[in-house]
Image (cartoon, rainbow, N blue to C red):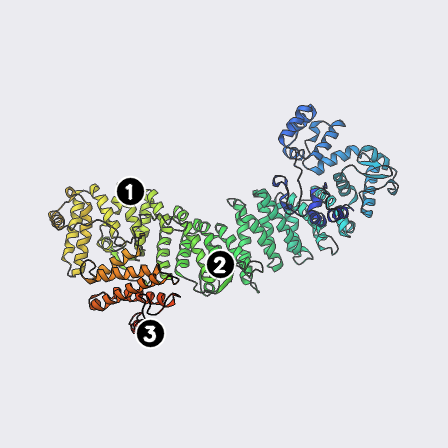
């Protein structure tokens, strides 16, 4: 009736505003009410997040200041608030609950008597026990509920309630009369009386009959069912077998309204405290996984758990263990219908649970691995479940490192890699740190593989798995795959704090692998060998055009810049960690990019680190390699004051011995390397006469070099003309003396004049354009053999543009006022058509 009235007024009376008071439950579950009040809430601070598209104002609960004011007004309430346990104190912020407590206090109850109350149902029980003090009064109240439910009305005629104790219930204050009608004094009292005395919650089959029927009856009794389930739950045996049996029976029934089923299930979810509370449900799943309605019930349960966790923002260890246990029990059946609830439960825990709890980690890991195994084996495929299960397995890697590695290693191997890496590698990379904490060597293998192997397919992939009908967003397999490297790059900083050795090796493998996958040739490696028998192969060549330690202000460091993370680590590392990074880099196949940072940062660090790096910096191969030369020189120069005389003598004698190179290029290159060293090392620190003589010789010939980057580039803003002239000069043109400068100036002037003479110009402007054109042609005819090809090509281009501008102008009249005749103009066009410019590009057959 009220829904119809609201709809009619809203649609037919334009100048009327409807303001209706309704309980939250009815608005959340009443589609007609939500549709009638569609719109945005007027005040977001007083809005229910589940009703974002409904115009409503949420009446807030009492605040702490309200309770303090009440305490000041009533010493009895002050005693109640002081004695109330925390759960009861939360309840008393609801004004209806507070009114019940106040009435009980008025009836003579002591504040201490409230100590056992933990729920609203318990509070109403105490109220009803006081007001409905006999079985006959309870029967009369139940009979009233039955008549109301039968008629779908919350106010009925008193004569319809055929019970002698009806008047006593009215006198108790539970019911109120208005003439011939009777109703409950509050809707919550109706719900609670219905749940306690009317619904047969102890006999599921009879309860099903009571709550079956049309939607209006279901909506009327659904809140009462919440109290019934709570009552059954409180008195149930360990594992709550009767409660779960009731809920499973409700979901198996064919004619139960979804609102009723959801209320029963959500009440159970809200009452789960430990994994023991779901033992009854776990047993039912194990005994009959194909039971009617079970999959639907578990699917909805998992969503309610997700809502509960999201609303709270966290999940306690007992709750988390309970839901992980349920997920494990569900996926253990290897049933597709039960796999989705398991996936959703694990997802709800993924971001919010504390996995430092070993019990939770173990159960979550078991469920995650079972889910991934099942999803990979499923036909048809389950790609969304696979990607989720990869994340879950990676997060819980420590629960069983061996089993987890065996599963996840499949992602890296062919033929699975080529078929699925674009979908799966990113999620494996996302969980690299939990993996690294348990198996840093496997984490290193992930870096090596994902930076070495590549997906080259540019075929379209759709975000979300399929094209959206609203806003289809697409990518391609290659781009999807490369996102995994972003995760790995960002994680290297933390990986270094887990294992310096494996993280450094991961960086080297990633650096070398990425270059290959980006299309650079592998190139030759050089062997860096030491007298103690150790050696490593130095590969790589950094194609950066500037020094790595000179940051680019126009390009800030990216989150996934692994090399930058490595530099930050080296700058803060203690001697032991620095040594671990060096030893990792000085093994197997290494990278010049990494070694340049090791040496360069070492030059900035304290004496102990420079001493440790001295044998590497002074090694001839590191001094010759283009990636490491500059930083090795920096390290040598920084360490020279700390080295004793014998160490400096040994280095200088070794360095001077290389002056005997037979190859002239090698000899010159080594000489330039030594000139860099001598340019930084003070003369007073040189230990040998031979090196001192070389310094004197280089200094006399201005051969001491600055230790600048081997290559660099500079970007600047300026006129194109200036750059063009500079280029011509480098290519041999003489712009200062001779005709080339004059022709270039005339050519540039004609170009500027064409730009300033639009086709709509008058005859005098066109005549000036023609005169300058003929003058430039004359210069080309006079000096053509002495001009640079670029000047000739550019000049004839400007002539062509000038002729085009003249011919297209409406003011052009052949032969008038300084303008060319058609014959003269055609003759020049013939010359232009016969020109070799623009040159024909060579094409390959």
- Left or right: 20 as drawn, with respect to 353: right
Circle 3 SS class? loop
Is the Cβ of the residue at disc 3 closer than 8 Å to that at disc 1? no
Circle 1 SS class? loop
- Left or right: 772 as drawn, with respect to 704: right
**Percent x, y for residue 762?**
37, 61
Q: Earlier in the sequence, mark 3 or mark 2?
A: 2
Foreground mark, 3 or 2, reads 3
Foreground mark, 3 or 1, reads 3
Is 13 above or below relative to 404?
Answer: above
How many numbered badges does the structure rendering display? Answer: 3
Residue projecting furthest to the bottom: 845
Identify residue for label 3: 844
* Real-space Cα separation, disc 2 to disc 1, in angstroms: 41 Å
Identify residue for label 2: 424
Residues packed near mark 2 inside 10 Å, few (<14), some (14 to 19) or many (20 plus): many
Residues packed near mark 3 inside 10 Å, few (<14), some (14 to 19) or many (20 plus): few
**Percent x, y for residue 583?**
31, 50
Circle 2 SS class? helix
* Real-space Cα separation, disc 3 to disc 1, in angstroms: 56 Å
* Real-space Cα separation, disc 3 to disc 2, in angstroms: 42 Å
Q: Residue at x 62, y 57 (%)?
A: 338
**Percent x, y for residue 814?**
34, 70
Q: Earlier in the sequence, mark 2 or mark 1?
A: 2
Residues packed near mark 1 inside 10 Å, few (<14), some (14 to 19) or many (20 plus): many
Quadrant in which the C terminus appears: bottom left
Is 311 above or below relative to 458?
Answer: above
- Left or right: 345 as drawn, with respect to 396: right
Q: Earlier in the sequence, mark 3 or mark 1?
A: 1
Residue 144 numbered mark, or none = none
Identify residue for label 1: 605
């Amino acid at each position: 009736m009220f829904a119809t009235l609201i709809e009619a007024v809203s649609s037919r009376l334009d100048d009327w505003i409807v303001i209706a008071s309704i309980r939250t439950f009815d608005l959340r579950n009443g589609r007609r009410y939500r549709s009638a009040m569609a719109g945005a809430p007027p005040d977001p601070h007083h809005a229910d997040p589940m009703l974002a598209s409904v115009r409503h104002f949420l009446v807030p609960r009492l605040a702490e200041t309200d309770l303090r004011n009440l305490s000041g007004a009533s010493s009895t309430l002050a005693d109640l608030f002081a004695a109330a346990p925390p759960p009861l104190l939360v309840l008393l912020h609801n004004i209806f609950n507070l009114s019940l407590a106040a009435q009980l206090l008025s009836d003579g109850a002591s504040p201490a008597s409230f100590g056992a109350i933990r729920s609203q149902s318990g509070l109403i029980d105490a109220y009803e026990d006081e007001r409905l003090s006999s079985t006959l009064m309870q029967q009369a109240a139940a009979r009233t509920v039955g008549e109301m439910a039968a008629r779908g009305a919350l106010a009925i005629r008193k004569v319809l309630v055929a019970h002698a104790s009806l008047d006593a219930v009215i006198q108790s204050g539970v019911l109120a009369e208005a003439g011939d009608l009777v109703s409950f004094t509050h809707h919550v009292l109706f719900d609670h009386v219905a749940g306690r005395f009317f619904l047969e919650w102890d006999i599921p089959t009879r309860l099903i009959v009571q709550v079956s029927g049309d939607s209006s009856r279901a909506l009327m009794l659904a809140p009462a069912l919440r109290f019934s389930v709570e009552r059954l739950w409180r008195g149930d045996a360990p594992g709550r077998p009767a409660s779960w049996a009731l809920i499973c029976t409700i979901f198996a029934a064919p004619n139960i309204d979804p609102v009723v089923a959801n209320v029963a299930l959500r009440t159970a979810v809200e009452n789960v405290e430990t994994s023991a509370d779901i033992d009854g449900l776990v047993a039912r799943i194990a005994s009959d996984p194909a039971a009617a309605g079970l999959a639907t019930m578990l699917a909805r349960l998992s969503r309610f758990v997700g809502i509960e966790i999201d609303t709270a923002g966290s999940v306690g260890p007992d709750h988390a263990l309970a839901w992980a246990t349920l997920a494990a029990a569900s996926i253990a059946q290897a049933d597709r219908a039960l796999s989705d609830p398991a996936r959703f439960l694990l997802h709800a825990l993924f971001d919010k649970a504390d996995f430092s709890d070993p019990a939770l980690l173990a159960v979550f890991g078991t469920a995650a691995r079972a889910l991934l195994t099942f999803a990979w084996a499923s036909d048809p495929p389950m790609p969304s479940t696979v990607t989720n299960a990869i994340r879950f397995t990676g997060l819980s890697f420590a629960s069983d490192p061996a089993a987890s590695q065996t599963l996840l290693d499949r992602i890296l191997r062919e033929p699975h890699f080529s078929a699925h890496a674009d979908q799966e590698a990113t999620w494996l990379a996302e969980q690299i740190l939990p993996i690294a904490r348990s198996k840093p060597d496997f984490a290193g293998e992930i870096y090596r593989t994902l930076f070495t192997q590549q997906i080259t397919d540019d075929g379209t992939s759709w975000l979300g798995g399929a094209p959206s009908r609203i806003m289809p967003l697409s990518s391609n397999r290659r781009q999807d795959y490369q996102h995994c490297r972003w995760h790995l790059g960002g994680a290297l900083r933390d990986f270094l704090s887990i294992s310096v050795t494996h993280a450094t090796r991961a960086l080297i493998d990633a650096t070398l692998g990425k270059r290959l996958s980006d299309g650079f040739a592998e190139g030759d490696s050089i062997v860096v060998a030491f007298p103690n028998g150790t050696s490593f192969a130095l590969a790589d060549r950094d194609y950066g055009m500037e020094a790595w330690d000179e940051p680019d202000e126009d390009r800030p460091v990216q989150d996934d810049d692994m090399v930058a993370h490595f530099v930050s680590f080296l700058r803060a590392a203690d001697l032991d960690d620095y040594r671990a990074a060096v030893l990792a880099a000085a093994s197997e196949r290494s990278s010049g990019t990494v070694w340049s940072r090791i040496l360069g940062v070492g030059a900035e660090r304290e004496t102990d680190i420079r001493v440790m790096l001295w044998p590497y910096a002074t090694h001839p191969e590191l001094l010759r390699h283009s990636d490491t030369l500059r930083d090795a020189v920096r390290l040598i120069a920084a360490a020279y004051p700390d080295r004793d005389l014998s160490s400096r003598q040994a280095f200088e004698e070794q360095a001077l011995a290389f002056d005997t190179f037979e190859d002239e290029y090698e000899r010159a290159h080594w000489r330039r390397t030594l000139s860099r060293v001598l340019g930084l090392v003070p003369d007073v620190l040189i230990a040998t006469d031979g090196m001192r003589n070389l310094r004197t010789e280089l200094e006399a010939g201005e051969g001491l070099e600055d230790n600048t980057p081997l290559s660099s580039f500079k970007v600047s803003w300026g006129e194109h003309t200036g750059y063009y002239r500079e280029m011509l000069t480098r290519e041999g043109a003489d712009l200062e003396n001779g005709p080339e400068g004059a022709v270039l100036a005339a050519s540039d002037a004609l170009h500027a004049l064409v730009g300033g003479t639009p086709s709509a110009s008058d005859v005098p402007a066109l005549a000036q354009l023609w005169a300058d054109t003929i003058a430039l042609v004359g210069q080309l005819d006079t000096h053509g053999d002495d001009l640079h090809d670029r000047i000739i090509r550019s000049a004839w281009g400007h002539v062509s543009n000038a002729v085009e501008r003249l011919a297209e102008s409406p003011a052009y009249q052949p032969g008038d006022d300084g303008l060319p005749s058609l014959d003269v103009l055609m003759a020049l066009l013939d010359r232009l058509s016969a020109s070799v410019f623009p040159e024909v590009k060579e094409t390959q057959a």
